Structures are given as structure tokens and as C-alpha cells.
Amino acid sequence: MKGDDGMKDVGEQLAERLKKLNWNKDYRQLINDAFNDVEVKEFIKENQGELSQEDIARSASKVYEFVSVKNKIKRGEETHAPGYDPQLTLNNHLIDVTYIPSEALLLQKKQQAIHNRVRSINMPKDIRDAELADYDLEGRELAAQAAGRFIDEYSSAPKKFHRAMYLQGSFGVGKTYLLGAIANGLAEEGFTSTLLHFPSFAVEMKNSIGNNGTMKMVDEVKRTPILMLDDIGADQLSSWIRDDILGVILQYRMQEELPTFFSSNLDMVNLEKQYLTTNNRGEAEPLKAKRIMERIRFLAKEFRIIGRNRRQFKN
Ligand code: ADP
Ligand code: MG
């Protein structure tokens, strides 16, 4: 009750003061409205001891700023500091406004940090928001379970070796989506992955033979904490790509025990026979194929994903 009387006093005193200053009536009304804001009233009440009537009157423009910015945000309008919420503070016996990052901005920054932990090279954009929680389980229960388990186990012991997954399934069943969801799940736990569309990567490597960039790129890829080779087996392999690019990457990852995922239309047996054995000149090199396959098997366990083709074709 006492506080309420105090508030009335403040309002009256302020009105007096403003009258004396002969402020324009509209502006006076705006200031009055600002002092009637619930948060403002509350703030003044809480800080009664620190604020004299004169201090409060001298703070009018700050109070007005606070309320008008707050209302702008409420109406969804852009403010002078987008993403920041105004907050009343006490500053040397005057009311002041400081700006603090809004919940939405903090969330957005957190999301950005998570996205930044997933490096995609030639990957479709829609995996950016792929989530294990949204993953339709039909025909992929085991794979989804194993994916969740991988994230948990890797997160709790990232220095230990964890066998990753080789996702096999036909076109459009959601292999790439699942890789994206795993990478995003790991990113939320603070871990960085690199997703790489292998056929495009192979073309880029071929186009930049002899370039300094080639080996630097291979070096970067092989050292990434978590690597995902998407769509392996979809192109025609040359012996060079197989032995000097893929072979080098897998050899390093096996030695260093770094998690490496794969996705392919082909199962492991056919990957070896159809993809790794015969090079683009038609020569069969079964021993070399076998060596690559051993590394893949060491790094990843095979999971079959079945289901309908989810790709939407737009005409
Ligand atoms: P694949 O790599 O096996 O060819 P994709 O992962 O590219 O298949 O999936 C095909 C399409 O279906 C993509 O547009 C993808 O975003 C969508 N998709 C796949 N799995 C799911 C899922 N579980 N929930 C929602 N959309 C999905
Ligand atoms: Mg795919």
C-alpha cells in the first residue's frame, strides 16, 4: 500500500515537473505512459531507497527508451539493436537502460556454433537440419539405434576407438539424411565432423592433380575427427583415386583409430567386387580392392536401410 502511494506521488511530481518545463503535451503523455509500465513501476519500487523523486524525474528519457524499445520488440518491429532486450538498471542514482542478448539471439548463436561443427563438402543443404529425433524408424530401427549409441559412446569417450557405420541402401531411403543427423547430434555434444560427397570429391581431386591444394585437401580430410564419406561406389573409380586418395585417407584413419562413416548403394561385398576391384580402364585389381575393404570393415559396421524412395521429384 505504502509503495502504491509512493508511486502516485512520483507520477504527480513528475507531471508538475514536466508542466514547469512546458513540454509538449503528446510527449508528456508518452512519458506518463512509460512510467505506468508494470516493469517500470516494479523497478522503481524495488529501488526506492536509491532513487529520489528528482532522480526518477531526471531518468524520464531512459524510462521512455526502455518502454518504447520493449513495445517495439513486442510488436515484432526492428529495433536499433536487433536481438537485444532492454533492461532497466541503476546507474549512479539514475535509471539507465542496458541491452542484453535476447533468448532468441542466444539460441541462434548456439545453433550457429553447432552448425559450424559440421563441415559439408558438396553435400545437399537439407541435411543441415537433419535430426535423429525426426528420423522415421520404419526399416531402419537398428541403424537408428546404433546411430544414437554411437553418439552417446563417442561423446563419453572421444579418445577411444569407436567403430562407425556403413549405411547401405537403395537410392532415396535416407542414408545421407541419417549421416547428417549423426553429424548434427555429435555437433550438439561439441564434436566436429566432415561430410563429404565422395564422387564429387574424387572429381575435384582429379581436376586438381599436381596442384598443391590436392594433397592439402586430402590431408585435412584424413585428419578430421569424424569423417563421413557419402555415396561411395556411385562413380567409376580410377586406381589413383582408390590407392592414393581413398587408400591414404583410410590407412591414416585406421592407424589413428578415427571414426569414419560410409554410405553406399552397394553392400560391402558388392562394393569390393563392383567398385573397388575393376578400375576405370577395366583392369581387375582384386588384391588392392581387398586391402581397401579391410580398412572399411575395420572402421565401420554394415547396416542395411530399407524403405521407400523419399525423394520428391518436382516437375
Ligand atoms: P539417400 O542418401 O539414401 O539417397 P537421402 O538421405 O538423400 O537418401 O533422403 C532422400 C530424401 O528424403 C531427402 O530429401 C531427405 O531429406 C528425405 N529424408 C530422408 N530420410 C528422412 C526422414 N527420416 N525423415 C524425413 N525426411 C527424410
Ligand atoms: Mg545420399
Image (tube, rainbow, N blue to C red):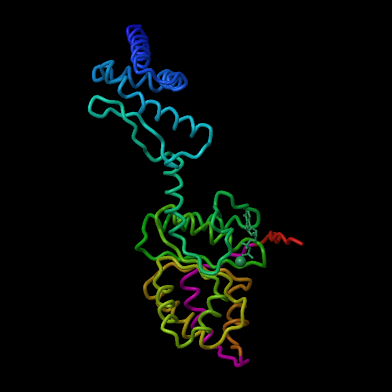
- Start and end of the magenta stretch? 281-305
- Which quarter shows the C terminus? bottom right
- The location of residue 308, given as percent across then percent down, is 71, 60
Which residue is at the front of the view, 192 or 154? Answer: 192
Q: Residue furthest front?
A: 22
Picture layout, residue 116 above or below residue 232: above
For the point 57% across and 57% down, the residue is: 142
On screen, residue 51 versus residue 23, left or right, reads left
**Residue 284 position by quadrant:** bottom right
Picture layout, residue 45 above or below residue 105: above
- The location of residue 245, given as percent across then percent down, is 47, 82
- Which quarter shows the N terminus? top left
**Residue 189 within the magenta-colored segment of the rendering:** no
**Residue 141 position by quadrant:** bottom right
**Residue 296 within the magenta-colored segment of the rendering:** yes
- The location of residue 189, given as percent across then percent down, is 41, 53
On screen, residue 185 versus residue 124, left or right, reads left
Q: Residue furthest right?
A: 315
Taking the image in four quarters, ligand 2 sits in the one at bottom right
On screen, residue 298 versus residue 159, left or right, reads right
Which residue is at the front of the view, 189 or 49? Answer: 49
- The location of residue 252, given as percent across then percent down, is 40, 77
Q: How many marks?
A: 0
Picture layout, residue 36 above or below residue 193: above
